[in-house]
Image (cartoon, grey):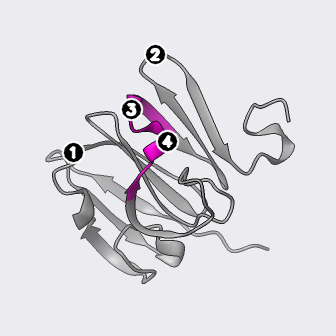
């Protein structure tokens, strides 16, 4: 059997983002790959007012109140949206969507799907088995 990792994420009323779990690939956003057994503040998101959080198999995504999207963790399949395959150890703005107001995000095992305020859907990452909804 495969080993599954549970990522715990907490969004507090004050719009501070705390998380704990296995830190492999940097998916906790704490600027390292270290595990964190108790909730710890993701300091690089202070002042950004997280509104929605989604966790995938290797990565995490955060939508802020101003509609910006930040991703971090494993990037091997391009599912962070940074036009590379590099792991990000702390939340990094998805520049390709910087001028788009993102209203929702969801993370799959190795892909991501975002919805903008106008109802347009954006997908990226591993497209095996048609999971990106593209014709290829």
* Above/below status of 2 relative to 12: below
Instruction: Give whichever of discs 3 and 2 has the lower sequence position.
Output: 3
Q: Do the residues under discs 4 and 2 have CB atoms within 8 angstroms?
A: no
Bin the neighbour count of mark 3 within 10 Å (Cα to Cα): few under 14, some 14-19, many 20 and up: few
Query: Looking at the picture, how far across and down is residue 30, in whole percent?
Result: 34, 73
Query: Looking at the picture, how far across and down is residue 46, in whole percent?
Result: 18, 57
Q: Point out the stretch of residues depicted in magenta.
A: 92-105
| CA distance for labels 4 and 3 | 8 Å
Q: Which residue is mark 1?
A: 49
Instruction: Give whichever of discs 1 and 4 has the lower sequence position.
Output: 1
Instruction: Give whichever of discs 1 and 2 has the lower sequence position.
Output: 1
| CA distance for labels 1 and 2 | 21 Å
| CA distance for labels 1 and 3 | 18 Å
Which label sits in the foreground, 3 or 2?
A: 3
Q: Which residue is mark 2?
A: 118
Q: Residue furthest bottom?
A: 34
Q: Do the residues under discs 1 and 3 have CB atoms within 8 angstroms?
A: no
Q: Do the residues under discs 1 and 4 have CB atoms within 8 angstroms?
A: no
Q: Secondary structure at mark 1?
A: loop
Q: Do the residues under discs 4 and 3 have CB atoms within 8 angstroms?
A: no
Residue at 30%, 75% (x, y): give it. Answer: 38
Q: Which residue is mark 4?
A: 96
Q: Secondary structure at mark 4?
A: helix
């Amino acid at each position: 059997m495969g080993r599954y990792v549970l990522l715990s994420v907490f969004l507090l009323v004050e719009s501070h983002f705390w998380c704990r779990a296995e830190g492999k690939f940097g998916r906790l956003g704490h600027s390292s790959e270290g595990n964190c057994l108790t909730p710890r503040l993701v300091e690089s998101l202070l002042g950004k007012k997280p509104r929605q959080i989604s966790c995938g198999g290797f990565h995490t995504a955060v939508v802020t109140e101003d509609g910006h999207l930040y991703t971090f963790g494993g990037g091997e399949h391009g599912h962070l949206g940074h036009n590379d395959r590099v792991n990000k150890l702390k939340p990094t703005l998805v520049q390709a969507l910087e001028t788009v107001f993102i209203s929702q995000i969801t993370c799959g095992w190795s892909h991501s799907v975002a919805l903008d305020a106008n109802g347009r859907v954006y997908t990226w990452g591993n497209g095996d088995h048609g999971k990106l909804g593209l014709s290829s």
